[in-house]
Amino acid sequence: MTMSDKVDLSQEAERGDTPLLPNERMWGFWEFTYANSALAIATWAFLIGGATALFVGVTEGIAAIVIGNIIGVVLASFSTCVPCGKYGTEQFTFLRSMFGSNGSRLVYLLAVVGLTMGWLAVLGLMFGRSIDGLTGLLNEHEAQPTGTLVMVASLFAILLTGFVVARGPTSIKWFNTLVAPALVLIMGAMLYLILSERSFAELLALPALDAPFADKRVNFMIAVEINMAAGFSWWPYVGNLARLTKNQRTAFWPNLIGIFGAAVLGEVVGMTAAAALGDSDPTIWMTHIGGLVFGVIALGFVAFANVTSMINILYTSIVGLRQVVGKQLQAVKWELLVALFCVIPLIIVMVAPGIYDGFFIFLVWTSALNSALAGIGIAEYFFLRKQRMNLRHLYAPEQQSPYHYWKGFNPIALLALVVGFVVYVALWNPQTLDHTTLFTFISASLPGCVIAGLAHYLLTRVFATRLGWGAYAPRGSAKPTSLDLNAEGLSND
């Protein structure tokens, strides 16, 4: 086999649904940390921090940011990164084991296609507004959130994202390694400049910008829920990034430094700046921090931080798309798929730029779905499968696989997903902020996650094993029902 053939096979493995062998995985601990940091630090981190400042003061806001993010990130990582990192499997291929082949396609449509199109448009608009703010600093003109420059820059961001992703994971790794450390330094500098204007004690005493409820407990739990939604929002993407890591330890721990640590830093900066300056839009308050030179540098890097986030989520979405459609799409060139996937976000930017202003509502609605998916994933992999997957079943022809369930759907997992979603909405309506008393104490995402996972576990134990679905091991057995291709040859663990 020639070197060119090896490169082609490696690229196909990285871009396809086949398990990656250890020597095909390109990210170690720090590479994955850089990828996660680049994913987490974007204008959306500042917007989440700004949204937090609307409901609570700075002291409560810091607590809400830390509590919400650690819960969401840890649960999302356990449900996706650990199994994908261990076996090198594509995330939505892994979902066949719990949802069935057609069920995993349905989840992809719900969790990725609908959401990713929106995220790419929102992040593109964030890039455009950052560029508009940057030119405003240089030319001293007022920001124009829906002006021509914003639109053109937004379209450019989406096209640049498509160009980098079309070149594959190697270019993504280079982009992340370059941008992520610089972003962390800039976030630290911003926090220093904010503290230089006000003392730490003064910042901690700043009140909420627009607390909607007289009961502070309700406002605090909404702030926690916003940040929990931010943590769970990584569910559709981090699994396909984790499959590029060396092993499952490397797939998990960088999330606590990259996604959690970087997101918390960015959100705290956004919250304190919003509370101190009275505006939650980072493309506005950032122009007032540090003077012209720092403002230009900061806005420039933050603008491209949106692109790094877009690159990572687009890559994972395309990899998932090739899996859910099947062999028909394997023959289509990777570059063409990337181009086609970018068409709808380009249209959204042109016809619905107001999606940017609905960022907060868009974010928290995603948690109604993602939190339930995380709970089902944890129940499946850790409690039903005992962290052992049968890859022959996973990659067998659909009709012959025990993961085919009923016509390619697992009604149990889908019912658990609906139950988790309904529990979330019953406790709290993100659209109207209507809530129950119970929400004040337990949030909406956490019970949605736990109840969805519990429903999946119990219904599987009662019905799936009797129907012969899923090849689950008998209760109390540590061994799978048939050959388990685990760490041997597929993981360094």
Image (tube, rainbow, N blue to C red):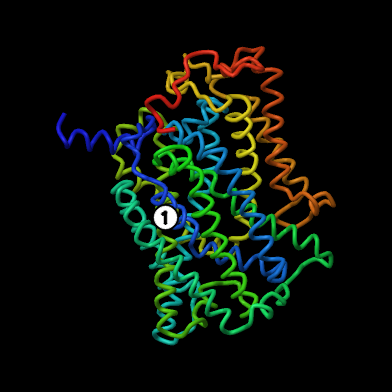
SS class, disc 1: helix
Instruction: Write down the quadrant of residue 346 in the picture.
Output: bottom left
Give the answer, above or below, for where 235 lies relative to 277. Answer: above
From the image, which quarter does the N terminus lie in? top left
Q: Nearer the viewer, residue 406 or 396?
A: 396
Q: Is residue 54 left or right of residue 191?
A: right
Residue in the image at 61% along x and 54% along y? 69
Residue lying furthest bottom: 140
Residue in the image at 40% along x and 53% along y? 311
Q: Position of residue 301 (x, y in %)?
A: 40, 69
Residue 471 seen in the current view: yes
From the image, which quarter does the C terminus lie in? top left
Q: On the image, numbered disc 1 is attached to which residue?
A: 34
Residue in the image at 51% along x and 46% along y? 253
Q: Position of residue 409 (x, y in %)?
A: 57, 24
Residue 319 seen in the current view: no
Q: Position of residue 214 (x, y in %)?
A: 84, 67
Question: How many numbered marks, from 0 up?
Answer: 1
Give the answer, above or below, for where 322 lies relative to 428. Answer: above
Give the answer, above or below, for where 418 lies relative to 42. Answer: above
Q: Amino acid at mark 1?
A: Tyr
Residue in the image at 52% along x and 24% along y? 388
Residue lying furthest left: 2
Instruction: Write down the quadrant of residue 38 in the picture.
Output: bottom left
Q: Nearer the viewer, residue 40 or 255?
A: 255
Q: Is residue 126 left or right of residue 382?
A: left
Q: Nearer the viewer, residue 307 or 103?
A: 307
Q: Position of residue 186 (x, y in %)?
A: 45, 71
Determine crowd level at label 1: few under 14, some 14-19, many 20+ residues with C-alpha closer than 10 A: many
